[in-house]
Image: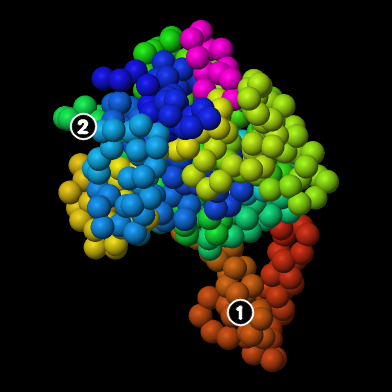
Amino acid sequence: MNADIFIGGGGPDYATPQGLALKYANRHGLIAGATGTGKTVTLQILAEGFSNAGVPVFLSDVKGDLSGLAKSGTADHKLHGPFMERAGTIGFSDYSYHACPVTFWDLFGDQGHPVRTTVSEMGPLLLARLLELTEAQEGILNIAFRLADEEGLPLLDLKDLQSLLVWIGENKQSLSLRYGNVSVQSIGAIQRRLLVLENQGGAGLFGEPALELADLMRVGDDGRGMINLLAADKLMAAPGLYATFLLWLLSELFEELPEVGDPDKPKLVFFFDEAHLLFDDAPKALVDKVEQVARLIRSKGVGVYFITQNPADVPEDILGQLGNRFQHALRAFTAKDRKQLRMAAETYRENPRFSTEEAIREVGVGEAVTSMLLKKGVPGIVERTLIRPPSSQLGPITVAERQGVMAASAMAGKYDAPLDRKSAFEILKARADKAAEEAAKAEDAAEEAETPMLREFNAARRYSAKGVTRSTSRPVRRGASFGEAMTKMVVKELTGTTGRRMVRGILGGLFKGR
């Protein structure tokens, strides 16, 4: 098996092979360039190369074009001629067409197998980012997660979190003494954000069965790594949900995978398309988290590749960790564009044959300025590279073809049916029902324990609203006797302050704790 992934041809005549060393593929990478310059094809041939080398891949299909990975390219494609010509130019003598092993995933369950996680696994930091909460609202969310752990309340789906927030609101006074101010307004704001998330279709992300990471790291019997393709064309309508889900998946890989040191090839390669969505308006705590994950996850054997239009979309501390780079053309229409282009060029190891800045501006479609890590992780000299053509189909497959791939997948049936087991919603509902039942029993017991005098008093109170006062057996007449007048006085006294004290004295024990 070749130790490198063939990328294309470089040099003055594009005849010098350019490859990505598998040993350094987990040192992360960047694919950048303006719209229409060839980033998707570069992403496709990298996914093919990793899969052929036995490395599983996870990537998101933002435009729907990458589903063609599941189908072999054909000689009658409109680009067959240019592809064959390019293969000859770069010395790609063994170029052939073939499909790749693909598993389709979809948060909405329409174009792939459903992807779910639990609210507990998402955690308060990422969930607060997803819901765009303020600092005070994030504090309430942290209280909710703390209480869920202490009270044994599993948070699996959104209704679990919603019911727990209601419970917190009902007990805010006692909780405020322990955790600080619990504001009903903050709870209401979180509930409204959860409603917005539901309207965006995000409720389907939370629940069980939750995704098992091992299902993303499968290798077929033929030795090829599985390409896990997340349908993201509809998901992009909710960019916060898209970015948070991918970040959650990345953090799960970081937390669960064991250390592997310096492997000969990655255990998994993770492509983060539209990377700017992750960092736009992100709080510093979240950016620091991403930086930490990017710095340490390579020791778990995971390579992370960010795809974006401009390298400036990625924070500098993270950009400095991306060793393998594929820079397609950048357009410089404004002073700011020219400054960003110059800064992008300065991050490469110079090639004396050409100006890096001019090359980034001038490279054509399907061509890129590349720099891959060499022996001992040293950055390679920047080179103009003609990207090799893909072996799989360029462009999307049909709906029927996608359904066929899903039906034949080993994941068929495993995640399709949601599971709703006992969790916080059911537990809190059972507690409320039990409390209501005990209160009803206590009230019945109190009525049974009434003395005749107290029963007369309660009956008088019940009928006072109707202008009726009754004795044990007959209604009171207008010409009431002295005894009946005294009875009225006793009832009036019982309904006064002294009477209420007497009732509390008699029934206080029965109503204790209600």
Q: Is residue 233 left or right of residue 333?
A: left
Label 2 sits on a secondary structure element that is loop
Residue 326 percent across, percent down from the top left: 54, 33
Residue 208 in the figure: left or right of residue 470 = left
Q: Nearer the viewer, residue 139 or 36?
A: 36
SS at circle 1? helix
Mark 1 crowdedness (10 Å alpha carbons): few <14, some 14-19, many ≥20: few
Q: From the top left corner, tell me how far across and down residue 139 is, in percent.
A: 69, 38
Along the line of sight, the residue nearer the viewer: 347 or 360:
360
| Location of mark 2 (residue) | 220
Residue lying at 67% horizontally and 86% vertically, measured from the top left: 467
| Residue 105 drawn above or below residue 485 | above
The main secondary structure of the magenta stretch is loop
Q: Is residue 376 magenta?
A: yes
What residue range appears in magenta? 372-382
Q: Which three-letter amino acid code belongs to the residue tagged 1?
A: Tyr
Residue at (75, 38) in percent of width and height = 340
Foreground of the two, 105 or 386: 386
Q: Nearer the viewer, mark 1 or mark 2?
A: 2
Q: Is residue 513 visible?
A: no
Q: CA distance from mark 1 to mark 2?
A: 80 Å
Q: In the drawing, what numbered circle is on residue 463?
A: 1
Label located before the other in sequence (1 or 2): 2
Does residue 45 appear to the left or right of 288 in the view shown? left
